[in-house]
Image (cartoon, rainbow, N blue to C red):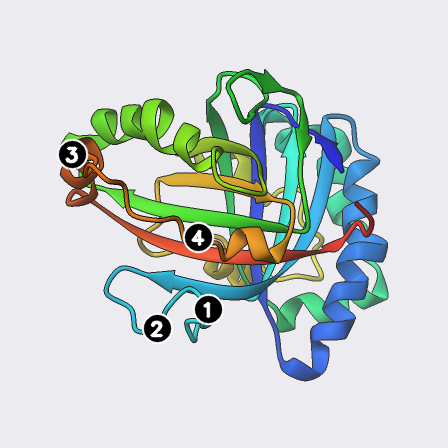
Amino acid sequence: MKITIGKAVLHVRMDTKPALEDDLRKFLSEEKLPQMLSVPGFLSARLFHGIASAGQGLPGTLKDWVPGHHRWLAMVELEDERVLQSQEYLQMRRKLSATAKRLLPQVTMVRNVHIQQFPEKGALLPGGGSSAQQPVGEVTLMVLAKLEPAWHEEVNQWYDKNHLAHKLTLPGHLSGRRLLRGTDASWMDTRGMSPDLSAAWYSAAEQEPRPHQILATYEQATEEAAFHREPPPAVPDEWSKKVSAHFTWFRTIYRRVWPEGS
């Protein structure tokens, strides 16, 4: 499968009660995401369910799930972040269905916008080059990272010149990107909200207390590729060893549940 990507991603992580998970999946895949894609500037969307997670300083391995983290992820590709302030989008948000009014107050949510950093346009492909039609598979590895302020530039350079390209040499890896969390909160403007949802609930749900700065995504053909453990290099990568001491990360493997197909 290939999807059209732009300069920004709306990245929404969600959780709800187990009894409401099927309702949430149906609402997002059959109503909310198709509705968003009817708005100019919204290019493509995917819905995922988390199957494994791990982070520095957290128990478990990437075959486990870290309790307390959001199982559901919607990724919406945008021409750029400004489309979230368009009149068409704001008007759409005012029109909530009965399902939305019932379900959304029972969903915990972290909603962020990430701006494309590398490659400058499109997604990085194995062997180099990029494409605005991004190849994607059954699963996606998401890496969220917090950086020490003085190390932002070097960690970014390491991702772009070393890490992303290396990951795409591994079996089943289709494409990758590095994005930076948007710092301008104007896209969170609540003027377009339906009055049926309280601003207090929305304000509490909109951001993480200590948000990650970097989002790196790696698209893989199958779960087998996602869980592939690469052999250690014969010669240690000194650059990777150097920068890894200056950022913390949280990794999650998500299985795509919508749209279906390959």
Query: Residue 123: which quarter of the image?
Result: top right
Could you tell me the amino acid type at mark 1? Lys
Q: Are marks 2 and 1 in contact (CB under 8 Å)?
A: yes
Q: Determine whether the residue tagged by mark 2 lies in a helix, strand or loop.
A: loop
Residue where numbered disc 1 is placed = 63
In this view of the protein, can residue 246 be seen by the observer?
yes
60 relative to 85 in the view: left or right? left
x then y, percent, for residue 127: 51, 21
* Closer-to-camera residue (170/17): 170
Could you tell me the amino acid type at mark 3? Glu
Q: Determine whether the residue tagged by mark 1 lies in a helix, strand or loop.
A: loop
> Distance between the Cα atoms at labels 3 and 1?
27 Å
Residue where numbered disc 3 is placed = 238
The residue at the point 65 percent across, 81 percent down is 18
Residue 100 vertical position relative to residue 228 in the rendered view, above or below: below
Residue where numbered disc 2 is placed = 60
Could you tell me the amino acid type at mark 2? Gly
The residue at the point 48 percent across, 54 percent down is 228
Could you tell me the amino acid type at mark 4? Gln
Q: Are marks 3 and 1 in contact (CB under 8 Å)?
A: no
| Sequence-first tag of 3 and 4 | 4
| Sequence-first tag of 4 and 1 | 1
> Distance between the Cα atoms at labels 3 and 4?
35 Å
x then y, percent, for residue 1: 76, 38
| Sequence-first tag of 2 and 3 | 2
Characterize the local packing of mark 3: few (<14), some (14-19) or many (20 or more) Cα atoms within 10 angstroms: few
Q: Are marks 2 and 3 in contact (CB under 8 Å)?
A: no
Q: Are marks 2 and 4 in contact (CB under 8 Å)?
A: no
| Sequence-first tag of 2 and 4 | 2
Residue where numbered disc 4 is placed = 207
